[in-house]
Image (cartoon, coloured by chain):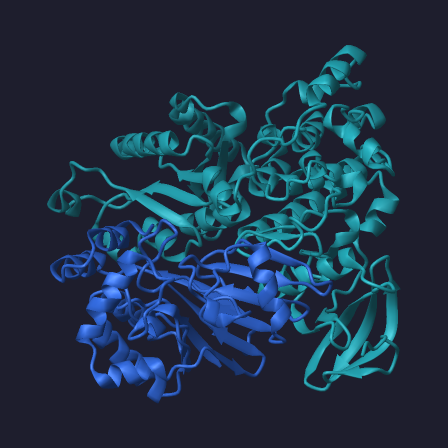
Chain colours: A blue, B cyan
Amino acid sequence: MRLAILTDIHANREALEAVLADATGMRIDRFAILGDIVGYGPDPDWCIDKVADLQARGAITVRGNHDRAIGVPDGALNAQARRVIDWTVDRLSAVHKAFLSELPLTVTEEDMLFVHASANDPQDWIYVTNENHAMPSFRVSKARLIFCGHVHKPALYSCDLSGRVMGHQFGYGTGVPLIRSRRWLGVIGSVGQPRDGSGLASWSVMDTDRNELTFRRVGYDSATTARKVRSAGLPEALAARLVKGF
Amino acid sequence: MQIKPATGLEIDGFTLGEKLHTGGFATIWEVTHPLYRTPMVMKVPTILDGFDAPTIVGFEVEQMIMPRLTGPHVPRVMGQGDFSQMAYIVTERIPGASMWALAKRAPLPIDELIEAAARMAQAVHDLHRQHVIHLDLKPDNFLQRPTGEMVLIDFGLSRHDHLPDLLAEEFTIPMGTFPYIAPEQILRQRGDLRSDLYGLGAIIYHLATGKMPFGEPETIKQVRQRLWRDPVPPRALRTEIPEWLQEIILRAMEVDPARRYQSAAQMIFDLTHPMQVRLTERAHKLAQDGFWTVWKRKRAMKKVKSLGAPISMAGQIDRAPILLVAVDLSPEMETLSHNLFLSVKRMLIIQPDARVACVNVIKTARLGIDQTTDEAGTHLHVSRLVGLKSWADCFDLPDDRLTYSILENTDPATAILEHAEAIEADHIMMGARGHSTARRFLGSVSARVVAEASCSVTVIRRPEKRRSEEATEVAA
């Protein structure tokens, strides 16, 4: 099975469209969306509809902190993010809100675990940003492969037979064999708001037959998204960061 | 539950036969599978009691890298298993002994050794083109197919440019085989393809002299000495070694990677064009460097942590390309050959490390006597060579980066294409003679080269010529 893994779409329609177009022709059998469908971006309703549509066709979907924040006062969100959430709430229908509130925190399928942030205490939204922060996920889960988002920078960690956790370099577009003598944690970069210095949308393909994970990047019309952010009256910083990817 | 390999054991459809080899880290078994008719072998890592990290990680590296390698210079992978039951890799079986059998007979006859060296370099170049540095080159890790190609085995220390390097942070000791390991590997640099060129140099040294360049060091301290101590020059051990071969060996074994060959293709080029190897003081050396030189080097090397920035593979192969330039020297083509000259010159500005191989083709009669055997033929050959050299004179390149060949063939396109393959050319530059009626029927040389070459081709035309003018031209 070839599984397309997307995360942190953040209401960015242009980026999601570009990723879905990139996925066409890559023989994708199924999708997994690791949360944060909304927040930061100007097209939350369109993005929820799209994800709901993918879910109806079998996509795995989990909830992110921004999805949860819809309708729930969340002290952990910064002021900027909170402002966008309040703006988003007004635009969403009851159906959209219900969709977000029904998303599970984690999904386990076969030897894979899907979660938005760190797998230990997923409701605490802990960032997996280094080897020490990757360790607890391996500890709480028995899954051989763990996929998460939340960080907005793609990364790959492994846990060897002795329990040691290592971060790895990887190239885009080359399938990394997730060899079975280790367990692996893939942090999938963000579709709608990349923060690793590249303005390209991130996503990944997990080929379970070949046992390979491929990180991908794809360009999208970020200028249009930025324009929409501005005309919606959302914070200027959220528009600017899309183009530069920081 | 771990299974131990044994004759008769069946796993994932493979049946183990006889044990062929017991090595330090693995055993090799003959295996069969009802679906495959190719002779195959299974490599099973020997895991010591407890957690045997180096063996396990080395095996993981092989499992990552080997299945993505293709071509005649690597064994084809037929299956693999993980540590849950019994870790293994099944590959096609390459009949015949390793180069170690050859090394045991060293010193080898010069001709035999050069051929083996060129073939080994070919295998290494093929590996580098697939973004992998071997990092453990030694005679044992080269097998030879009955068809002649060398096959590289044992990728436990290898590094793939685009894949995680499981070994990078794992171990703090240098990894490699001490007699052949490159100086920068001793400093734990794992990203430089020129480490493999050092290894090749050390192997050729061994095959040529019968001695390993630094003996068989046993401690890290002893291995480190090659950072400042130079090996005994091969010609001091065996006088019949030609100077050009010593030049190749010692250049490949330079301590500073920047002073070595910059790609395996460049080394192949020298091994196959001995008369064009530019001799430096390396070629003439007959004794190791003196005490003071070595002492000064040792002092300088004491605090060295790395030998320059490692260069990425794709980047390096691009940076040091081999440019084949096919020149037409006939007088009526003077403008065209001048335009070609200018284009090559421009190319050398953006590719300052390129090597230029100039060729000129003598078209021989389809049926008839070989022209070079008679006096007129020799005369033609020499005069073309003189013409070619004078054409390339103003490139102002050092001799070792500029070579000349006169090719003879009934078909000029075939001659250029075959030569490009032989020298591993990365780029062909040539002129197009024009659009005559005759050419339309007979086919143009450049069109065929463009269509059939496996590398990039640039075709130069005379800018001032118009189609209408050329239509009246007669094909040569």
Q: Position of residue A177 (x, y in %)?
A: 57, 66
Q: Is residue A241 above or below residue B237?
A: below
Residue at the location (30% across, 63% down)?
Answer: A192
> Which residue in the rendered view is the most extreme toward the top?
B292
- The image quadrant of residue A204 is bottom left
Q: How many marks?
A: 0
Q: Position of residue A89 (x, y in %)?
A: 22, 73
Left or right: A150 in relation to A135: left
Q: Is residue A13 above or below residue B314?
A: below
Residue at the location (32% across, 31% down)?
Answer: B346
Q: Nearer the viewer, residue A54 or B4?
A: A54
Q: Nearer the viewer, residue A118 or B383?
A: A118
Residue B338 in view of the camera:
yes
- The image quadrant of residue B42 is bottom right
- The image quadrant of residue B160 is bottom right
Q: Position of residue B3 (x, y in %)?
A: 83, 77
